[in-house]
Image (cartoon, rainbow, N blue to C red):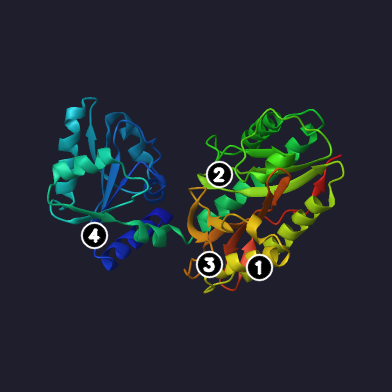
Amino acid sequence: MSQTPHAKRLARLQQLLQEADIDAVALNASPTLTYLTGLEVHLSERPVVGIFPASGKPALVLPELETGKLASLPVALEAFPYGENPDAWPDAFAQALRFCGLTRAQLGVEPQWFRFLELRLLEKAAPEVRVTSAEPVIMRLRSQKDAAEVAATRRALDVAWRALEATLPVIRPGVTERDVAAELTLQLLRAGSDPALPFSPIVAFGPESANPHAVPGDRPLTPPTLILIDWGARVEGYCADLTRMFAFGPLDDELDRIVQIVLEANEAARARVAPSVPAGEVDRAARQVIEQAGYGPYFIHRTGHGLGLEIHEPPYIRGDNSELLAPGMLFTIEPGIYLTGHGGARVEDDVLVTETGAETLSDYPRTLRRLD
């Protein structure tokens, strides 16, 4: 009988832990816990920690009110629930560590997710446990997507694009960035996105488009103007991330030019994606186009980032990253040019590394779209 996706992930984790000489990994409420178990819980004042040994059955410390979720999970976990009194937390942690045989062990955690609260509980339960970073293990585990993950990403992209098309008719003179962002959010939910969007849509008019992470405000659309929209959807937990450029009225020559340069940089970077190519070479392919056009100093961020259960995750497409791309890696390509006080341009696509090259999953129109 073939293994389920979650069983395969657990087996792969145990293999990687053994290779790294780490006895177990402890995960609090996080995307990686969801990735391994299917369990979705919010990070809150009540600790939730999964303990995954390099061999044997995983354990889970959780509040009693969450135990109803366990029966429907695709993996078997030994549960150690606790009640509302925080004094019960240390005993639950101690029982879980003893069950996994980890009273003396090297225990990996995710530094960007694991909190001081849970760390102190682990240390109190087993003072001889040595804590280390499991980030390299988690990166290797999650960076290459399986077929189910890719399929969910495709569905998220479809939702995102349909939501955009439903939103564009509201973009007219006098409408504000906030109005457009609100409509896009509504359309994303109507189109089928998970309620927890990957991020709030970025809608930026005119000079505000030169701010890569602009926050939609009460600026009204006053033609002629350049419009940047960066948005995404989430389906079954997996994220899509897109940016497209629009214009209302005629733009000046420089704004038209930077949009065209960014399109060429996007194409050059996507053309460089293939197995065994260093991630940094993809960044350099985009950067070279922009530098040769004279706008190098105005490309102020990396070319892309991994996508999955998190909107930003490895691999990171930046010049100093020598990591070799591998089939199943999925990331954005999003070169940009930002002219403070004038306007900015970015075109973003989601790209999958295949066995023979790459596939642009977001193969939708990307040229400047005029809305007037």
Residue density around tag 1, few if under 14, some if 14–19, many if 20 or more, within 10 Å: some
Q: Are marks 4 and 3 in contact (CB under 8 Å)?
A: no
Q: Residue at x 75, y 55 (%)?
A: 258
Q: Earlier in the sequence, mark 2 or mark 4?
A: 4
Q: Are marks 1 and 3 in contact (CB under 8 Å)?
A: no
Question: Disc 3 designates what residue?
Answer: 279
Q: Which mark is residue 371?
A: none
Question: Disc 4 designates what residue?
Answer: 55
Residue 310 position within the rendered picture, expressed as x and y whole percent measured from the top left: 48, 48
Q: Nearer the viewer, mark 1 or mark 4?
A: 1
Q: Disc 3 marks which amino acid? A: Ala
Picture quarter with the C terminus: top right
Separation of disc 4 and disc 3 at Cα?
33 Å
Q: Disc 4 marks which amino acid? A: Ser
Task: Identify which residue, 355 or 271, lies in the foreground.
Answer: 271
241 horizontally vs 246: left or right:
left
